[in-house]
Image: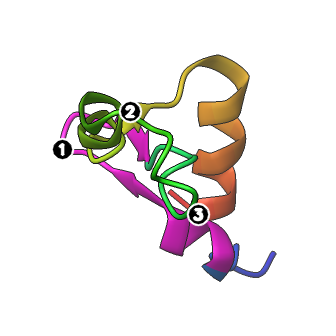
Amino acid sequence: MPKMKTHKGTAKRFRKTGTGKIMRAKAFKSHILTKKSPKRIRGFRQETELTGAQAKTVSVRMGK
């Protein structure tokens, strides 16, 4: 059976931590920022963890 190929779109959007968690960037931070509070905009900078079925799916697509 051939090797699984990494899905490059997924690899660019997610990363795996040393402990095996899948991290993703937050949405809503790219435009129309004038109506969003500075506190909210700062919150968009942090990554957040994927959980459950989403993490499993992304992990398979990343080939890891």
Residue at 35 percent across and 31 percent down: it is: 40
Residue 51, horizontal then vertical, whole percent: 55, 21
3 or 2: tag closer to the N-terminus? 2
Colour scheme used in the picture? rainbow
Task: Measuring from the top left, give residue 60's x and y in whole percent.
Answer: 66, 51
Residue 18 tag number: 1
Q: Say what secondary structure mark 1 lies in.
A: loop
- The residue range painted magenta reads 9-24
Q: Earlier in the sequence, mark 1 or mark 2?
A: 1
Q: Are marks 3 and 2 in contact (CB under 8 Å)?
A: no
| Cβ atoms at labels 1 and 2 below 8 Å apart | no
Q: Quadrant of residue 9?
A: bottom right
The residue shown at (81%, 75%) is 1
42 relative to 25, above or below? above
Residue extending farthest right: 1
Q: Is residue 7 magenta?
A: no
Q: Which residue is mark 3?
A: 63
Inter-mark Cα distance, 1 to 3: 16 Å
Q: Is residue 40 left or right of residue 17?
A: right
Q: Find residue 51 and name its label.
A: none
Amino acid type, callout 3: Gly
Q: Position of residue 48 (x, y in %)?
A: 38, 33
